[in-house]
Amino acid sequence: MSLLTVKHLTKSYKAGKLAVNNLSFELEKGECLGLVGESGCGKSTLARCLLRIELIDSGTILINNQAIEQLNEKQLHPYRRKIQIVFQNPSAALNPKLKIKDSLIDAYSQYKNDLKLVYFSYTSKDAYVKQLLEAVELPSELANRYPHELSGGQRQRVNIARAVSIEPELIVLDEPTASLDVISQGAVLNLLTELRECLHLSYLFISHDLAAVNQMSQRIMVMKEGKLIDQFSRNQLFAEERHPYTKELISFFR
């Protein structure tokens, strides 16, 4: 069953350049759909459009068959809970003036009247934060620290914990390991896989790293210059009919 459906999405900027050009795809419930492409191809613009951080020029974005591109902020509120995002830079995504526990409680505070938690429970702020930290394999004593007191890998785990805290249906992962060292990258990818299975999440995994996308995803899309130029299941990655640009990416992957 389709969780996210995108039809003919187009987004341009003032200079007239099409950042996303007539893009269509579907993301099924429970799957990780990978999106790979070089820097500047429009991947992050697409992510911001899906989150309604940016408005689209034309096209349709449907969540559970409900079009959201024309909704006002009040109408959009319940859908913002269903889609969360993990950004590339974990430091920029956290308020440096807030302790970790306060960052983790923020989303719950916004949506608590609408939430029916299944995997986590809220009996107290401290207990809730402890559950979230345990879910991303961080010690509970980090709750009282500030972001600058954590490593890059720990900060990204906090961002992941914040994203899953309100049990969304879909998480957009926008280059979530790009700023991490190799060891931290592997650990975070394994964690994301475990969380998807345990919490029954769906992912749109965006990266320029084909190896990471291949590890994480059941299906893969390839984007170039604002367009989707190839779509295939993971077991078709090395098939002869792949687009020449996909083959070029594969040559680096191998």
Image (cartoon, rainbow, N blue to C red):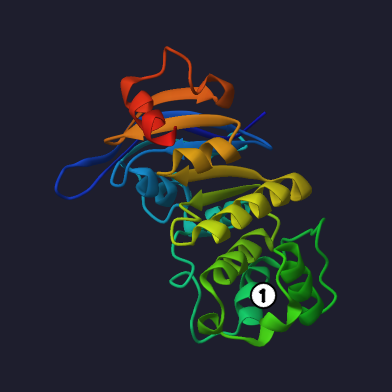
Q: Position of residue 142 (x, y in %)?
A: 67, 81
Residue 76 vs 43, above or below: the answer is below
32 vs 118, left or right, is left
Residue furthest top as drawn:
240
Quarter of image, res 102: bottom right
Tell me the amino acid under the disc marked 1: Ile
Q: Is residue 130 visible?
A: yes
Q: Position of residue 188 (x, y in %)?
A: 60, 56
Q: Nearer the viewer, residue 67 or 176?
A: 176
Query: What residue appears at the point 42 percent right and 12 percent down from the top-left corner?
Result: 241
> Which quarter of the figure is the C terminus placed in?
top left
Residue 229 vs 38, above or below: the answer is above
Residue 153 vs 240, above or below: the answer is below
Q: Which residue is mark 1?
A: 105
Q: Nearer the viewer, residue 141 or 20?
A: 141
Say what secondary structure mark 1 lies in: helix
Q: Position of residue 81 (x, y in %)?
A: 62, 57
Q: Nearer the viewer, residue 206 or 181?
A: 181
Query: What residue appears at the point 55 percent right and 65 percent down from the top-left corner?
Result: 156
229 vs 186, left or right, is left
Residue furthest front as drawn:
254
Q: Position of residue 166 (x, y in %)?
A: 69, 61
